[in-house]
Image (cartoon, helix red, strand yellow):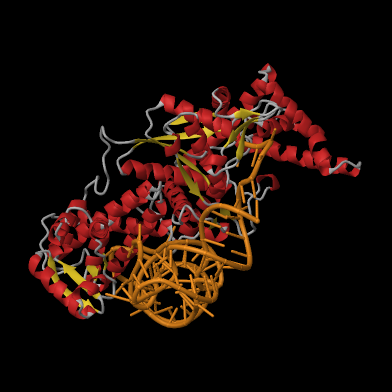
Amino acid sequence: MKIENLIHQATEVALKELYNFIVEENQIQIQNTRKDQTGDFTLVVFPFLRFSKKSAEETGTEIGEYLLAKIRLIQSFNVIKGFLNLEIANDYWLENLKLAYNNENFGTVIPDEKSKTVMVEYSSPNTNKPLHLGHIRNNLLGYSISEILKANGSNVIKTNIVNDRGIHICKSMYAWQKWGNGKTPENSGMKGDHLVGEFYVEFDKHFKAEIAELIEQGFSKEEAESKAPSILAARELLLKWEANDEDTINLWRTMNEWVYKGFDLTYKKLGVDFDKIYYESETYLIGKEEVLRGVREKIFYQKDDSSVWADLTDDGLDQKILLRSDGTSVYITQDIGTAKMRYNDFNIDKMVYVVGNEQNYHFQILAVLLDKLGFKWGKDLYHFSYGMVELPSGKMKSREGTVVDADDLIDEMIQVARDMSAELGKLESLSKEEAEDTFRMIALGALKYFILKVDPRKNMMFNPEESIDFNGNTGPFIQYTYARIKSVLRKASDNNIPIDTNLKLNSLSTKEKDLLKRITLFPVTLKEAGVNFSPAVLANYCYELVKEFNQFYHEYSILSEPNTDQRNFRLILSATVAVIVKKGMNLLGIEMPERM
RNA sequence: GCCUCGGUAGCUCAGUUGGAUAGAGCAACUGCCUUCUAAGCAGUAGGUCAUGGGUUCGAAUCCCGUCCGGGGUACCA
């Protein structure tokens, strides 16, 4: 294929696609030109030297002259060392601006019959304690990657698997029975999940005290841990639960309901939602059946103590337990059941699990097990593995109370937004409701952007004090720039300044052209974010775009620009930046205030 | 021990799949509000890209070794 054809095709797609296109199909390296050089694309000529047998400059100049003569879109070129800088005609960038201006679907792919259906599992809480910072990262990543996949043309089903059964729930239940004095969310005014979490901590307190006492009486640590009255009581509750004991089931239901109500509030505050919620109590038996089928079909084996195992050494993995010797199921058992149930319920092409990287091994095994059980989709599961959130004080441990609670964090951030706004004298003209809504958007914008801007795969540091920052590379900065553009557009409308899409222009400044180029990159960035499962790519794009806009905004006047063609162009440019930024940020789950 | 991920400015993070003089923000310092919102802009200072080799025209990026850190590693989830 000729390079001429490639460049022509590339005018219909975007900048980076051209880049990939040429690199992948032709081994020719084209990259964006450095900012301090003139030009738009740069061709690296070093690879040609072995063919040309000439100096880098000579080779570059020859290629440049050839391209200039052959390709209409190329306006000029220059050669520096081994780099051929090509300048593309302004018309190309302006065409793209028109494409993007006020176009709801710019950069997005609309699902059709051929679209894949993807199920994204995220959040996956336990019902014995409230959500914390780690869950926040999970929820934000899960929600935004779902939205990004949708924007890339997939049908997405958002799902949540609630871990509503097991020994940890029984601990909270026992503690409530023993020390609860009939405390409920209604009579205490406490949020249900926090109330239940309180009893989980209460349990641990007593449990630890009992252990200490037993050790003092001469028992070993292991003996003490298995003989403490609290843990025995919790185990008994679990047995009763599995035996369907009516009182136990009722208590379990009641306390879980408290938790669900609490979670719903937190989810609502975070702005995340689900299309379908699964409960482990409804799926673990299916998993157990599948494992037993595996035993019958000799896929798995049973030891003398009747525990069930999978031998995965042929797959480079270890032996894995699937059912305990007492017949109860382990973590992976329920994941098998849940997976089967999901594929029965929906016609899924791909399953995505948003789960922390401490479970990389777990999902590697799950894929192999599902495959062995004959589910052809098993191998295709995708574990969207993200890093942990660390605090300056170290690791979060829920039992030691060193967690950052999700609700507390959100409330604190809203308060900071409120104070900051008052200090700056902003939003005084708005009604109380409007102002409160804006504080909420800003606070959550700060929190969400702070978490989503970092590469999901990496561990991240969260300093509660420093992260409530509204300046620099932050959500509020992007929101602020958006609000300012909206303000300019309002004023244009108030002063009856028309916006004409028929752009007439003889020259572009560097800043304007930078912005136009950046706008062109939006579709490619969105695609990249989807392919790489990285909301961070999109977040950083929004920041770069807005930062460039700010520089432009300070350097040039828009409304008071005397040349009407120029003014018209700048208005369209501004409006387009606003549209794209809003769209990008919305895909991250961040709302954009019209004023702030 | 083995497997796996990571180490970039004082701090938090980018770095376009191997390219030109490694970039932002925070913190520090200096300017700029009678002009479209100063939650902003411009500037100064800050780097042995953990470390030692290798691959080639060219390495923060790819390969090997070493050091440091996170996570996992057969009856927790």
Q: Nearer the viewer, residue A97 or A240?
A: A240
- Measured as percent of width and height from the top left, residue A191 is found at 60, 36
Residue A118 lies in what quarter of the image?
Answer: top left
Q: Is residue A322 left or right of residue A80?
A: right
Please identify the quarter of the rendering in which residue A7 is found.
bottom left
Above or below A502: residue A274: above
Of residues A296 and A169, the one drawn nearer to the viewer in this rendering: A296
Q: Position of residue A19 (x, y in %)?
A: 25, 60
- Give the quarter of the figure containing the N terminus of chain A: bottom left
| Left/right of residue A115 with respect to residue B4 in the rendered view | left
Q: Residue at x 47, y 56 (%)?
A: A450
The answer to whether residue A15 is seen in the rendering is yes
Residue A150 left/right relative to B69: left
Question: Residue A191: in sight, yes or no?
Answer: no
Query: Residue visible at 29% across and 36% down?
Result: A115
Residue A573 pos. (x, y %):
22, 59
Q: From the viewer's side, name the closer residue of A141 and B76.
A: B76
Instruction: Look at the picture and state if A201 lies above or below A585.
Output: above
